[in-house]
Image (tube, helix red, strand yellow):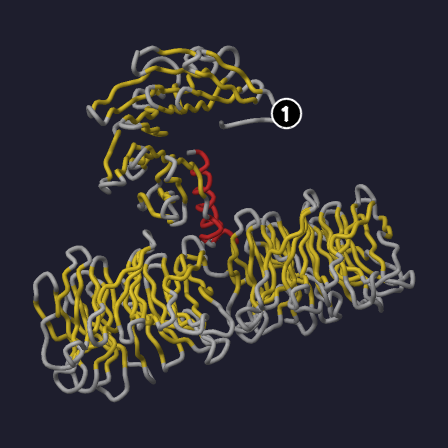
């Protein structure tokens, strides 16, 4: 309960911190270089599309809640035109030589044929329990409907003309109808059995779409198609008369997505009466829309290599830090402060933006250039030639004082600051060496002595990493120096090149060329284990690590983009994928090229910054890392009955109950809602959990055999932490003002207290006839057990706190709060023991 609350609180704090930021962000769904991903469809958290990476078109899907892609149908023949409704995907399948309609159930992971009739069944759509398609088995295309619940197929009543492109939402079906000679839009209401002509003007009315009471279509009565829509409630028709051609509308809620002039996706807000391009740039086609966002086929990699992208409504938009027709370059971030250089006054000067105060400040204002600023806490450094050679300068934000750090006659490159340490490379000794300046003492010292070429030094706390050519001028390896121990060590000396290392804590990351392209690798200084993090066939470079996050430059989408990887959750997410270049820095450290081969400090706390070149001038942008739902995904409170594992996770924003069946190897939702559901337990075919749909916690249960969900316990206060064994459920209940333990027997439908009295009785667990819990009626926490058969209650523990008991069969275990060891008790033998081990053992 506490962990879930903390996580949800964190999400709310993020939203609060980002107050004023808008929602909506462009992101890739499927990028496969050299193949075609087309015909996207979306509903809820599932995106499906037709994909020819295998050589013919198959159906693939992507789960927006888990970030996982998987194939739906791979068959030697074509699978086309997918449609999605909740957890089901339908498509047109050519395996029989003509078009049939097939369906995939995402929850049960089963494929089934909807229709394999003679002729062609094409252009399927699905809504809930109903599937529609266009069918020519009788010589002309007519609209057919199949009810998944009744398993009944019917041909919809219609005229004599051809009928194609059906779309269904609930009880209503719309389609293109040629009974009058050209195409019109018709509607059929399944509940009333009535047909209605919606649009019958001159020219073609085509490609209808329906959601709720809104039907939209492309209307060609003027000779050039416009988007028109009708509100079925008011019967009012509205036409959007825009220049050029507008086609292929898709409706969801108050929005209509459509194709503008064959190359752009626009989004029209029905209530506001205005439209906009959510993701300008590049050719986009085949829009689809749902509550989560707009998806499309994207041609940024060329006409023969479309990919699937989307504009996600539920992700915070990027935050613009800079604006104006100037070049803003080489950002660095520390806590809530971002520094960069730009040329707004004719020369590159250093500027700072405070995210908390929303104020910008000028650090320098000179008539000469400054290069590659870096920041740590209240100290900012940069490099300039004001003394004739490249020197590093330090500015303190508190004292407003500028100090020259380097004073010898050589050029000083790769300046970086961390805490009170500033490092760089210079050649004063005749070869490239790394030097360090201590801000506190004002003293400088040489770090390296090996005569070799060195590039890209990075410092974090007491560790410095760089790449070194001591094995040959064309061979670069990763080395590390520990300031505390004074020891130097090789991190990676693979025969391929390594580049752009970064260090944080005990982890080193770098770009690695061993796979004939640049990938991202990591090394753990504690475990001595090296592993690849990103091995996409495109190039990845300029990595930076901060705590659990690694960010890097990635060109898998054709242009340079920014991606991020969560080391703890093993989740990869796109950060910036707008048109043209999205980069950590300018790649050179201009205007003096002081960092031609270095990553940048682009992450701090919950923020990441980068250079955005999508609008002509380089701008600095920022986003909150945890604004991506995939990085907020947490899973907890697992329980298993042997063949089924259940748990609670927050993939949809709220904590809901999911299960994984080890027999079918499939995951399925147990209970989902716009409220929290926590602490699930499973026994046999029944799952119980704490349910917060009413505001406080009640106990709910689902019978997996019947699918029936029911209330076990509700009322005043909280009923929480259920446990189930057979037909019995126990829980902790504070309706009396303190926590007591209650039990319900489903065989008798009776509820009674297991113990109700002084003190707090918490965390009950039941197994067979035994119930155990922790109890502080005597001052300390003790473990109690009750035998439901005999009615006897027994205190199992002595002095000190004993907490978090569990029971299975006759074995009872708990955590000894005094010694931090695990204790166990054999109920049938009336004998127990504490199992001492080094360190802390908890939560048995």
Residue closer to the observer: 343 or 730: 730
In-front residue for pair 455/214: 455
Please state the horizontal and vertical placement of residue 401, each as a whole percent of the image. Answer: 75, 53
- The quarter of the picture where the N terminus appears is top left
Q: Dot 1: few (<14), some (14–19), or many (≥20) neighbours within 10 Å?
A: few
In the image shown, does 490 or 12 lie closer to the viewer? 490
Vertical arrangement, residue 3 with respect to residue 203, above or below:
above
Quadrant in the picture for residue 453: bottom right
Q: Is residue 48 left or right of residue 498?
A: left
Q: Residue at x 58, y 73 (%)?
A: 617
Tell me if 565 is positioned left or right of 281 in this view. Answer: right
Figure check: 774 above or below 410: above
State the image coordinates of residue 694 (x, y, percent, origin top left). Answer: 28, 37
Relative to residue 456, is residue 650 drawn left or right? left
> Do we see residue 696 in this rendering?
no
Residue under pointer 1: 838
Image location of residue 604, percent across then percent down: 60, 51
Q: Secondary structure at mark 1?
A: loop
Which residue: 56% across, 22% down?
821
Does 404 appear above or below 839?
below
Q: Residue furthest right?
A: 429
In depth, the one of 590 and 294 nearer the eye is 294
What is the tally of numbered marks visible in this picture? 1
Q: Residue furthest bottom?
A: 223
Work out whether residue 598 can be spotted.
yes
Q: Quadrant of residue 75?
A: bottom left
Residue 537, percent from left and from top: 58, 67
């Amino acid at each position: 309960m506490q962990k879930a609350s903390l996580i949800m609180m964190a999400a709310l704090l993020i939203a609060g911190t980002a107050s004023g930021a808008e929602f909506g962000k462009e992101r890739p769904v499927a990028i496969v270089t050299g193949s075609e991903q087309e015909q996207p469809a979306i509903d809820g958290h599932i995106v499906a599309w037709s994909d020819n990476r295998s050589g013919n078109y198959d159906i693939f899907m992507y789960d927006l809640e888990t970030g996982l892609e998987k194939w739906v149908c791979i068959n030697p023949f074509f699978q086309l035109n997918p449609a999605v409704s909740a957890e089901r995907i339908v498509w047109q399948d050519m395996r029989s030589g003509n078009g049939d309609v097939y369906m995939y159930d995402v929850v049960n992971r089963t494929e089934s044929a909807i229709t394999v009739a003679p002729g062609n069944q094409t252009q399927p759509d699905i809504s809930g329990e109903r599937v529609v398609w266009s069918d020519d088995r009788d010589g002309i295309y007519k609209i057919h409907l199949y009810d998944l619940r009744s398993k009944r197929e019917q041909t919809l009543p219609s005229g004599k003309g051809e009928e194609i492109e059906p779309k269904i939402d609930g009880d209503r079906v719309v389609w293109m109808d040629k009974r009058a000679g050209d195409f019109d839009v018709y509607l059929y209401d399944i509940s009333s059995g009535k047909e209605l002509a919606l649009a019958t003007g001159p020219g073609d009315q085509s490609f209808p779409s329906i959601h709720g009471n809104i039907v939209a279509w492309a209307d060609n009565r003027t000779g050039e198609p416009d988007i028109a829509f009708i509100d079925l409630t008011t019967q009012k028709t509205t036409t959007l008369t825009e220049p050029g051609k507008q086609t292929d509308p898709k409706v969801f809620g108050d929005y209509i997505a459509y194709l503008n002039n064959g190359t752009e996706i626009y989004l029209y807000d029905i209530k506001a009466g205005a439209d906009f391009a959510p993701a300008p740039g590049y050719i986009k086609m085949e829009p689809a829309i749902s509550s989560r966002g707009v998806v499309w086929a994207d041609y940024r990699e060329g006409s023969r290599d479309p990919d699937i992208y989307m504009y996600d409504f539920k992700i915070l938009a990027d935050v613009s830090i800079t604006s104006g027709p100037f070049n803003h370059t080489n950002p660095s971030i520390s806590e809530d402060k971002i520094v960069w250089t730009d040329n707004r006054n004719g020369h590159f000067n250093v500027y700072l933006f405070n995210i908390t105060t929303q104020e910008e400040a000028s650090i320098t204002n000179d008539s000469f250039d400054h290069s590659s600023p870096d920041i740590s806490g209240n100290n900012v450094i940069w490099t300039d030639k004001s003394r004739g050679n490249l020197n590093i300068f330090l500015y303190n934000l508190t004292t407003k004082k500028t100090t020259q750090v380097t004073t010898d006659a050589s050029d000083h490159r790769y300046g970086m600051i961390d805490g009170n340490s500033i490092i760089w490379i210079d050649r004063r000794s005749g070869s490239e060496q790394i030097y360090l300046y201590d801000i506190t003492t004002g003293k400088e010292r040489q770090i390296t002595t090996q005569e070799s070429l060195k590039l890209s030094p990075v410092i974090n706390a007491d560790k410095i990493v760089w790449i070194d050519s001591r094995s040959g001028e064309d061979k670069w390896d990763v080395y590390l120096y520990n300031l505390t121990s004074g020891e130097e060590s090789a991190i990676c000396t693979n025969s391929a090149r390594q580049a752009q290392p970064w260090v944080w804590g005990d982890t080193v990351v770098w770009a690695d060329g061993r796979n004939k392209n640049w990938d991202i690798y990591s090394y753990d200084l504690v475990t001595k284990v090296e592993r690849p993090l990103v091995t996409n066939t495109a190039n990845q470079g300029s990595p930076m690590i901060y705590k659990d996050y690694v960010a890097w430059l990635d060109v898998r989408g054709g242009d340079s983009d920014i991606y991020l990887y969560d080391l703890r959750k093993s989740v990869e997410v796109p950060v910036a994928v707008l048109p043209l270049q999205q980069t950590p820095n300018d790649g050179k450290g201009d205007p003096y090229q002081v960092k031609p081969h270095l990553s940048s400090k682009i992450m701090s706390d919950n923020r990441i910054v980068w250079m955005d070149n999508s609008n002509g001038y380089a701008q600095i942008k920022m986003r909150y890392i945890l604004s991506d739902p995939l990085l907020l995904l947490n899973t907890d409170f697992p329980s298993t009955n042997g063949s089924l594992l259940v748990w609670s996770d927050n993939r949809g924003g709220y904590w809901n109950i999911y299960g994984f069946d080890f027999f079918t190897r499939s995951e399925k939702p147990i209970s989902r809602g716009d409220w929290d559901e926590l602490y699930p337990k499973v026994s046999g075919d029944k799952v119980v959990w704490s349910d917060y749909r009413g505001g406080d916690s009640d106990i709910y249960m689902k019978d997996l055999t019947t699918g029936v969900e029911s209330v076990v316990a509700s009322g005043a206060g909280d009923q929480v932490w259920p446990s189930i064994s057979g037909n019995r459920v126990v829980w902790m209940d504070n309706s009396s003002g303190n926590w007591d333990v209650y039990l319900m027997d489903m065989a008798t439908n009776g509820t009674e207290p297991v113990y109700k009295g002084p003190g707090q009785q918490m965390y009950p667990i039941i197994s067979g006839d035994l119930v155990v819990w922790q109890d502080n009626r005597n001052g300390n926490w003790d473990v109690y057990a009750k035998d439901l058969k005999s009615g006897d209650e027994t205190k199992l523990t002595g002095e000190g706190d004993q907490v978090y008991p569990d029971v299975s069969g006759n074995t009872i275990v708990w955590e000894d709060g005094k010694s931090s060891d695990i204790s166990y008790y054999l109920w049938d033998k009336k004998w127990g023991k504490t199992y001492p081990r080094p360190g802390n053992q908890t939560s048995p």
